Amino acid sequence: MENTSGFEALPVEIQTEILSQLPLKFLMIFSVSKKWSSLIRTKEFRQLYLSQSMKRPRVMFMVHRLKFSPTVADVLFHSVSQEEESLLMSSGSDQQEMCISPEPGYDRIAQPVRGLICLRKKSKVVIYNPGTGKTLTYLPKIEARKQAAITTFFGYDEVTNVFKVLAFDKSQGAKVHQILTIGSSKQSWRRIICDHDHSPVTEGLYKDGVLYYGARSHTDKSLLMSFNLSSEVFTVIELPEGVDTLVEKLVIFKGEIALVKDPPANGSIQMMVRNEVSGEWGMVSFMIPQWKQTVEDMVFYFIGTVGTRKLVFVPAYARKGSLFVLYFDTATRDVMKYEIKGVVGNQFHSIRTFLDHIDSPLLL
């Protein structure tokens, strides 16, 4: 970077295009320079970089590393390209390893959305960019009692281009929710009312400007709730008979919302998939060959699909210092197991894994 005269001589449009192709760790180096920071921090560049990142989706591992103190833990964020060629070389330069703890105890973690993650400790929330290691703090506390049971969901309003946090506090009643718009001029929690009595029972799933989560009604009926982040309207999605949101997990299957029972029994996986156009639910099932030989004595869970053919499975725990990803190609019926090396030591850690994570230039 000492001699940038050749690069500086290029038109700004070409400079922007070149910078948008850089891995985030190199972009961070450029952002330190006053010469480039004004370009990198523009709205136009951020949008371009995000569009490029969406073409390079990643597998994000969140490794909860317990310490000797029962009240202190940290989380290691680690990502690698979800392309199979990169997974075969998972110890290479494509990996990104990042440690987090804005403060001890921020261990309630929502699904990554457009490269950012919402962390919560009791009634406090922060927004974290695992690629840059930067955190947006000083957000207002959720209005709740001291020992309240709080659930938070994180999403992105595609109409107004803002992130939002949805909070549910059981002590305030099943109809009262709170919402925080990140970056708004009046940054405070607003109360919104849902016409449907319900309590969330699953983690949230964000897709195309809508949050989905499993819930129970006041009559203990299983529900699938959707929350449009633009209109801020709740909708009840009727579930097929016999589906129980307490035992089934929300995933995205080939771009559609699905409910699946985990883990697969002897390689048999079944899920209910909702057609977004018709609203109808249909059963989809697969029998994965040589399942026991592949997973050995580990338990793998289904987390979603890559492309239109490949089902992805991961373990909930790291054992013997290893992380694994398993791909099943539904067309060729090939099963590939990839080991992600050099992430954790020889300790027992719990892991959450997400597909389609992207690098974001926000919070540089």
Image (spheres, grey):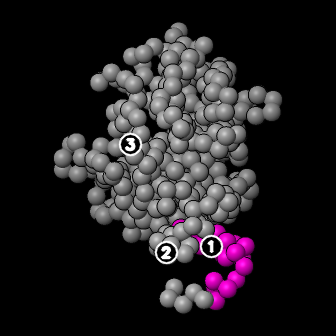
Badge nearest the viewer, 2 or 1: 2
In x, y percent, where is residue 160?
67, 40
Residue closest to the eye, 316 or 73: 73
In x, y percent, where is residue 337?
53, 62
**Residues drawn in magenta:** 6-24
Q: In the image, is residue 222 above or below residue 139?
A: above
* Identity of the residue furthest to the right in this view: 278
Which residue is label 2 attached to?
A: 33
Mark 3 crowdedness (10 Å alpha carbons): few <14, some 14-19, many ≥20: few
Mark 2 crowdedness (10 Å alpha carbons): few <14, some 14-19, many ≥20: few
In x, y percent, where is residue 88?
55, 71
Q: Residue at x 29, y 24 (%)?
A: 146
Residue closest to the eye, 178 or 352: 178
Which residue is label 1 attached to?
A: 19
Q: Is residue 104 left or right of residue 107?
A: left
Q: Is residue 315 left or right of residue 212?
A: left
Q: Quadrant of residue 347?
A: bottom left
Q: Secondary structure at mark 2?
A: loop
Q: In the image, is residue 358 above or below residue 215?
A: below
Q: Secondary structure at mark 1?
A: helix
* First along the sequence among labels 2 and 3: 2
Which residue is label 3 attached to?
A: 138
